[in-house]
Amino acid sequence: MNSLGELKNQMAKWNKISVDFHGCMLIFMAIMLSGCATSFGAGYGANRQSREEFARYVEDVFRLQNSMTSEVMMLTESEGDSGSHVTLIRAEQHMHKICAPLNEYASRDSDGLSVGLLLSRDVEKSAVDCEQAARQVQSLLKEL
């Protein structure tokens, strides 16, 4: 039978191992979440661009989708009958949904607010889909 002292020593070892494991996990998670882990990958976005290239790409996508929104607004305001453009309006609504992370990022950035890692990742994940949705709206506008 173990003495009380041996039992306390064993418990102290287990606690130290547990603290060491949790400490290592916290450090690992901090590295992963801090963005330092991106250097292990091949780049940013679906096309694995450099940070500067990706920033330019995202800015171009933002401008494109803003332009499409403006064109749809002008069209629907000038004609007054939005019922004749149901497909276009649905495509624009879909674009807004897909581009929501990019628009939130731009809004927060222009207001001087913190953007955050999760929002940055959402922008990275959605940029290509946002561009495709904006191109779909652009295509529909050209058909009119």
Image: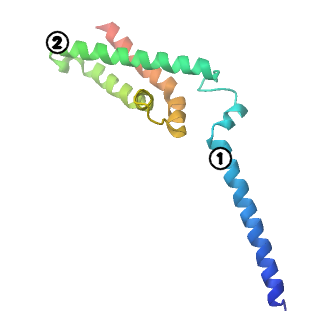
Give the percent coordinates (x, y) of residue 25: 69, 54
Which residue lies most toward the left here?
80
Q: Amino acid at mark 1?
A: Ala
Which sits in the foreground, 98 or 119?
119
Identify whether 27 is placed above or below 16: above
Distance, label 1 to label 2, CA atoms, is 53 Å
Instruction: Give the quadrant of residue 34.
Output: top right
Specify the amino acid type for callout 2.
Answer: Glu
Which residue is at 70% across, 27% downward?
42
Report the quarter where the C terminus lies. Answer: top left
Determine whether 32 is above or below 67 in the image.
below
Q: Which mark is residue 79?
A: 2
Q: Position of residue 15 (x, y in %)?
A: 74, 71
Residue 63, position as x, y percentages in the image? 42, 16
Q: Tell us which disc is closer to us: 1 or 2.
A: 1
Query: Does any portion of residue 135 appear in the rendered image?
Result: no
Horizontal side of residue 141 vs 118, given as left or right: left
| Residue 112 horizontal side relative to residue 81, left or right | right
Q: Nearer the viewer, residue 47 or 28?
A: 28
Q: Residue at x 44, y 35 (%)?
A: 113
- Judging depth in this view, the residue of 42 and 143 nearest the camera is 42
Mark 2 element type: helix
| 10 Å crowding of disc 2: few (<14), some (14-19), many (20+) | few
Which quadrant of the figure has residue 141? top left
Q: What residue is disc 1 on? A: 30
Would you call the spot at circle 1 few (<14 residues within 10 Å), some (14-19), or many (20 or more)? few
Instruction: Report the side of 116 relative to 32 (left or right).
Output: left
User: x, y (%) of residue 120?
Assistant: 53, 33
Direction from residue 82 to residue 66 in the image, left or right: right
